[in-house]
Structure formats: C-alpha cells, structure tokens
Amino acid sequence: MDLQPPLGSAAAELAPLPLAGVTVVALEQAVAAPLATRHLADLGARVVKVERREGGDFARGYDSTIKGQSSHFVWLNRGKESVALDLKTPGGRQVLTWLIATADVFVQNLAPGATARLGFGAATLRARHPRLITVDMSGYGAGGPYETRRAYDMLVQSEAALISVTGSPDRPAKAGIPASDIAAGMYALSSVLAALFRRTATGLGAQLEISMLEATSEWMGFHLYFAQGTGRTPPRMGLSHATVAPYDAFPTADGPDVMIGVQNDREWARFACDVLGRPHLATDPAWATNEARVRGRTALNELIARVTSRLGGPALEKSLQETGIAYARLGDATGLLNHPQLAGRRRWRPVRTPAGVVRGLLPPFTFADVELPMGPVPALGEHTEAVLRDLGYPDERIAALRSLNAIGCPPARAEATSVA
C-alpha cells in the first residue's frame, strides 16, 4: 500500500487547514450527523463528540469487523474528541452547556424534541449565543404528520421512493450504502460551510435544519421530473438507465461483463462504427436517436451482446478506450481496497484507532496546498477529562462528576502501529 503524500500536495506544510480555529460540538449518533462532522474535522475543525456515558454512540456496536471495532464507527469518527456524559444528570448538562458556549457550531441528530427537552433546543441556544450555528438533523423534519416517526435509512429510502427505482424490474432493493443518511450528512456539511461564510460578513450564526427525507427527495433528481411529465414512476432498470441506451452490462468471451454507457447520438455513431463494426446502425432510424434506442432497448442489448460476447475483455476495453466510449468493469469492495487509481493517486493513509492502525481514504476534496488531517478514531470518553480541564474544571470537580456518574472515564489506547 502506498502511503506517500497525494499528488498535488507537495506544499502541504505551507497552508493552514481551511477550518482551523472552528469548534464543533456534536450530540450525534449513527451515520448522518457523524458523517457531516467527520468532514468538518477533515477540514481542520475541532470536533467534540458528546456520547452517552454508557455505551456511547450506538454505532460503536453495529459490528466488530475492523480489529474488533465497528466498521461504521471507524468510518465516521476519525479526528474527533470523545466526551462521555450522562445528560440526565445536572452535572452532565452543565458540561454540555459550557461546551456549547465555546462552540461555533452545534450539531445534533437525537430523536425529535429530545434536545429541547434537555434544554438545548436551537431557539434557546441561538438566543443565548447569536454567533452560534445550530444544525438539527432528523428523519422527516419538524412539523408535519411524520415529525415523530422513527427514521432509519432503509425507511427513508422507502418513503422518498428511492427503493421504487432501485433494483431489478421484478424486485425492488434499497441502495447498498446508507444513501439517505449520506445525503443528509452532505447537505449538513455544505450548509454549515455556507453559514460559516455568511457569519464572516454578518457576525450572525444560523439555525439550520436537515431532513433525511428532503435530502433524499432532492437526490431523486430527474425521476421526479420524469414522473411529472409522464404521470408514472420510472421503472426499475437494474444496471440500465430509464432514459439512456445503451447503458448496461454486456458479456465478453473470457470473463466478467463490461459496463458500457453511451450518452448521446454522436457517441452512438462512433460506437456503432468502431466498436460494433456496423456503421449502418448510426443512421438507421430504429437506432440513430437515443429515444429510439430506449424504445428498442431489449433488441438493442441483444444486438450489442452478440458482438461483445465474441470479444475478449481486454480487446473490448481497448476498442472502447480508443473510440472514446465510457466503460468499466464491475468491481467489489475488496477490489476497491486495491484499486489502481486510488493507489496511483496515493489516497490511502494510516488512521489510528483504539485497537491499532487501519487504512483510511483521504477526504475526496483535495487541496493543492495542504493535506487534510486523518486524526485518530476516539475511544469512548477518551477526551472527557482533557476537555473538562480546557473548560476550567479543577481536578476535584472532575472527580466529583465521575463519582456522580455524570461523566465517563477513558479506556487505555492501544499503541499498535501495523496497518490493517
């Protein structure tokens, strides 16, 4: 594994991190909010993750696949400081109050109404701290008939119709990644960055709300407009595309299928002439336009498959590359760990965790003049005492909070250095 600096980062030591000096306090769990705050940490913000004293973020317990740790938690929580509090105790709530007073951004995705009941509702906090940016993340948003519904990723994918357009024609499927969580997390990230930018001009914070349903509905994209224009939902297409053809997997003579996508009629003409060796298809009215190809998709795919199935994979790929037609091989997660493009661009870095070092991908936003940090994944409560001391708590007060079970104590961190 190549652990050299990424291409274009030779001057990494010369520039400050984009969010250096920004403090984020996150009362978060699962995926959506932790993804947003991990990217804020990636960009250089200090992120203080507030977790339950007993058990912490429940994503810590999803599985034990990465050196005995949860793959979700390791993915979502590097570069953060973990503070373990019992917010049912006055001492725990007081600590959170002081933390928020030091923060630029407060992010939460607890159950609807939970933070307000604890005294940390967005309106209350904004009245107390006008420069604070608050982010409330939920499944369905405040108000409306779904406000109090539980909202897990699969359920929101279903409500937002993503499942209706995913899968094969005879069976729907949810996306293989937590798409609704990720959508909400990315909109939270971008809106926080916008609010920070606006604050530099106005001095005022913001009260932001992110709904998984609304984020996923936005991601439905052209499907919503297709439905408006036709009165029907686009069909499930498997690997195909509802409005573009050819766009599918095609067999080869010696191995895995090759994915081929033709986006416009100019590409189709090149594909027909130079890859299929049938130039008449470029002008035949049955195939010359994309709409005609979509109407005749089944016959079109059969025609293409008769040609590709006689070609070896390398020969087909060479022809597609030389002709300028988009193609790919169907990869899997284990193959992605060794993808030649990620290796060639030096995207892997060692990341420390409580159980030792694992591999992590650099954030997908690359700055030419700085390499973004890949901080450690925190153990539950690892930074509680240090953060309290930063807030001015004396040792005797910390000991008292510990004796009252208002705070959690950190376990020891492993010092292993081998990369998984």
Image: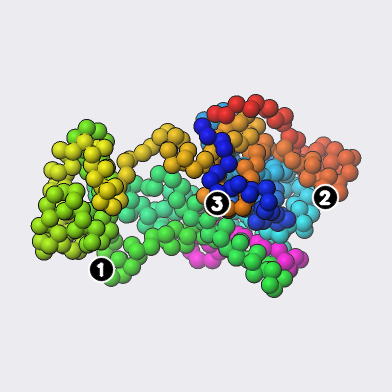
Residue where numbered disc 2 is placed: 391
Circle 3 crowding by C-alpha within 10 Å: few under 14, some 14–19, many from 20: some
Q: How many marks?
A: 3
Q: Which image quadrant for residue 220?
A: bottom left
Q: Is residue 266 left or right of residue 200?
A: left
Say which of marks 3 and 1 sits in front.
3
Nearest the viewer among 195 and 351 is: 351
Q: In percent of the image, x 63 and y 34: which residue is there?
A: 353
Q: Is residue 352 left or right of residue 386?
A: left
Say which of marks 2 and 3 sits in front.
3
Q: Which image quadrant for residue 122?
A: bottom right
Above or below, 253 against 295 in this view is above
Q: Does the image show residue 110?
A: no
Residue where numbered disc 3 is placed: 366
Residue where numbered disc 1 is placed: 230
Q: How much space separates mark 2 and mark 3, taking CA atoms? A: 34 Å
Q: In percent of the image, x 38 and y 37: which residue is there?
A: 332
- Amino acid carrying label 1: it is Thr
Image: magenta residue range: 127-146
Mark 2 or mark 3, which has the lower sequence index?
Answer: 3
- Quadrant assignment for the C terminus: top right
Magenta segment main secondary structure = loop
Callout 2 secondary element: loop
